Amino acid sequence: MSISRDLERYAGLFASRTRVMTSSAMRDLMAVTARPEVISLAGGLPDTSTFPPQTFAAVTQRIAEESCAKALQYGPTEGLPETKGCIAEAMAAEGMRVDGEDMIVTTGGQQVIDLVTKTLIDPGDVVIAEAPTYPGAVPVFSSYQADVVQVDMDADGMRIDLLEETLDALGREGRRPKFVYTVPSFQNPAGVTMSAPRRRRLVEVAHERELLVLEDNPYGLLRYEGPAPETLYSLDGGVYVMYLGTFSKTLSPGIRLGWVVAPPPVLEKINLGKQAADLCTSTLSQLMVQAYFEQGHWAPYVQSLTELYRSRRDTMLDALAEHFPPQAEWTRPAGGLFIWATLPDFIDTTDLLARALRENVAFVPGEAAFMDGRGRSSMRLNFSMCDEDTIREGVRRIGEVVKEQVRLYGTLTGEHPAVRLDPGDEPEAESASVVRLPRRLPGQRRADRR
Amino acid sequence: MSRVAVLKGGRSLERQVSMRSGARVEDALARLGHEAVGIDVGPDLIARLREAAPNAAFVAMHGRDGEDGTVQELLEILGIPYTGSGVLACARATDKVLAKHLMIEAGIPTPDFHSFSESAFAGLGAAQALPAIEERLEFPIVVKPSSQGSALGVKFARTAADVPAALIAAFSYDSRVLLERYVAGRDLAVSILDGEALPVVEAVPRDEEFYDFEARYEIGRTDFVCPAALDPEVAERTHELALRTHALLGCRGFSRVDLMLDGDGGLFVLEANPIPGLTDTSLLPQAAEAGGVGFDELVGRILELARLPP
C-alpha cells in the first residue's frame, strides 16, 4: 500500500486560503454526535422519511420510460427550462414572479453561497452577515478570505439601524461591503423573522448605497403561523437583491437542487463560475423535480411537512418550558427548523455539549454561528428531524445538564442568577457583546394543543 | 508478519484525533508487512476482536476508554498482547490529580494545585474554600478537568470572577477538577520510546496567550520546534524528569510527558499521556523523527513492545 497520510509531504503545496479551513475542537465534538445512540437535535435535516416511496418510484419510473437518455446526459449550465418552470411555480407560491432567464439551477443552495462569494469577494473584502449567521456559510466566507462583519438581530431580525451604523463605520475606513447575506424568514440558526418595515428599509439601504443583498430563503414555505412575509426579492424587484432558493427543505436535500435569481450582469458571472465548478446541475435531479411537479403533489406535500413540523416545534417549545431552568431563554420561530436558546453567560455551550454527550444528546453550540467567538452561551436546536417523543427526551436531557450547571454556579458563588426576561432592561452596550433575541414569556406554555 | 488489530475512534471526545492516529498506524503496519485490522471501537469490540483473532492489538485511542485502562482490561481478559501502558499506569496517568499526588510524593516538581469533586461543592461547601485557594495559587489560575485528555475544558481564570464559569466548564468533562498554579514560560513535551527520552519538542503559540485544543492539533496556530533550543543542562534535566515521571506512573513502551519551563529555569511536570497522538501533526512522531526514528520504525518498535502482563 503506497497511500500517504503525511501532511508534511503536501503542506508546501496548499493554497494560503486553506489555512483557515481547519477542523476545530467543536467539529471534533460534533463528530461524536453522529453515534446512533445520541439523540441529535444538532442537524438541520428535514424528515425525509415522510416522503412517499411510491411517489419516488413513480417519478423514477417515468424518467426511465420517457427521458432516460436525457436524464443520463449533461445539461445546460444554467439548468433545464422545464425545471426553471417548477422553480417559478415554487416562487409564485411565495408571491414572487420570476422569469426563467433570470435564474440558474444550482447544486443545492449551498452552491449559491459559494458562487456568489466567489463572484464578488476578493480576499479581505467585507461581507455583512447576521449575528448569529447560518453556520454553513461561515466556512464558505472563510475559504474566500472574506472579512465577515456580523450585525446583531433581535425579535424582528437584523437590526437595520445597526447595519447602517456598520456601513457608515466601514465607509469611514474606506471599505465598502460587497454584499449583505441574510436569511430573513425563520432564520437559521436564530429562528427569528425580519419584520416588514425592516425588510423595506433593508431594500432601501441597498438602493441608497448600491449594495447587493443575498436573500437566503430555504424555509419560506415552512411557515407555521402568521402572515407570509414578503420576500426582499419581491420588494426590490431584482435590482440589488439576489435570491437563493432550494428544494432541500421542501422536497429533499439528497437531490441537491437549489437556484439563484440575480440581476443579469451578476448572473452571467455566476454562470461562468458555475460552469467552472461543475458544468451543470444533475440532470437526473432536475428531471425528477419536473416529473414530481407535474404530478401536482408538491404543494400538498409541503403542507403536510408544515403540519408535522409545526407540531414538533410546539412539542419542543413545551419541552423547553418544562425542562429548561428559568434562567434560560429561547426564540419562538414562526417557521423553519430551528430554535435558538440562550443560557446564562457562565455556561459555555461547547463545554456543555461535552457534558450533554455523556447523556447521549447533542445540539449545535452557538459559537458555530459567529466568526468572532460570541454566541458561547447559546445553542441551536433542530425540531424537524426527530419525532415528538425523541424531542421531549432530548430536551429533557439537555435541560437536566443545564440545571445541573446552574445549580453548581449557585453553589460556587452563593448566589442564584436572576431571571432576566425583558431585553429592554439590558443596557445598550451589552447588545454589542451578547446576542439578545426574543424571549419567551415566563411560564408560557401551549395550553390549547395537548 | 502478524495480524494486528488497530483500536481507534470509540466514544471519546478525542475520537477524531484517534481516527487519524489509527489510520496512520494501519498504513505503517501494512508497510511493515503486517496485516492491520482497523477497529472503530464500539459495542461490538469483543466480537470483532474474537473474529479477527489478532496476534497483538495496537491501541491508538485517546481519552476515555482507550487511555484510561478500560480497553486494556478487556484485552487482558481476551489474552491479546497490546501496545503501550498497562491498566494501572493508564489509570494513574489519566487521573491528573492522582498523578500529581504521586509526583509530589516522589519529589517530582509539579505546579501547586487543589482538586475538588463536584460533590465537594454540592455537599461539603467547598466553594467557601475558593478564596483561600485563590490566594495560595495566585492569579492567573488554570482550571482543568482531572481526566480529560488534550486541552478540552482547560480554562484560564484571570480573576476570582472567572473561577465559577471555569469550574463549570471543567466539570462538563469530569466530576473531578483541579485548580492549578499557572506556570508562565515555555511549553515543553518529552516523548519516551522504549525507556529512552526523545528530543524535546517546544510548542510556541503564534498569537494565543494560552494555546488551546484547536491550536494543539492543527497546523498554523502553533509552531513546534524540535529539538527545542535549550541549554544542554536544561535539556538533560527535562529528559530526566520525564523519564522519572514515566517510570513513576509505570508507563510502558511509550508515553509523552508535558512540562513547563519557567523564567528562572524551574521545570514543572504537568501531566503524562500514556497514548499520545500519532497524527501527522502530533508531537511524538515529530520527536521520533528528530531522534532519527521514522514513523514506520516508531510504529514497529511500539508494536514489538506489545505485551500481556505476566
Image: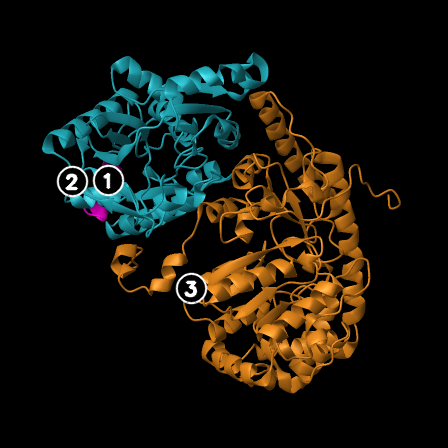
Chain colours: A orange, B cyan
Residue A378 drawn at (x, y percent): 60, 44
Name the residue beneath numbered marker 2: B229
State the residue in front, B140 or A15: B140
Disc 2 is attached to a residue of which chain?
B
Q: Which residue is mark 3?
A: A145
- What numbered label is drawn on residue B202? 1
Q: Is residue B300 magenta?
A: yes
Residue farthest to the front, as pictured: A172
Chain of the residue under the numbered disc 3 shown in the image: A
Q: Main secondary structure of the magenta part?
A: helix
Q: Secondary structure at mark 2?
A: loop
Q: Position of residue B193 (x, y in %)?
A: 21, 35
Coordinates of residue A230 in the picture (x, y in percent): 75, 69
Residues drawn in magenta: B293-304
Instruction: Say what amino acid the circle numbered 2 marks.
Output: Ala
Q: Which image quarter: residue A303?
A: bottom right
Q: What is the crowding at mark 1: few (fewer than 14 residues within 10 Å), some, or many (at least 20)?
A: many
The first of marks 1 and 2 along the sequence is: 1
Q: Establish if A7 lies above or below B254.
A: below
**Any mark on residue B10, and which?**
none
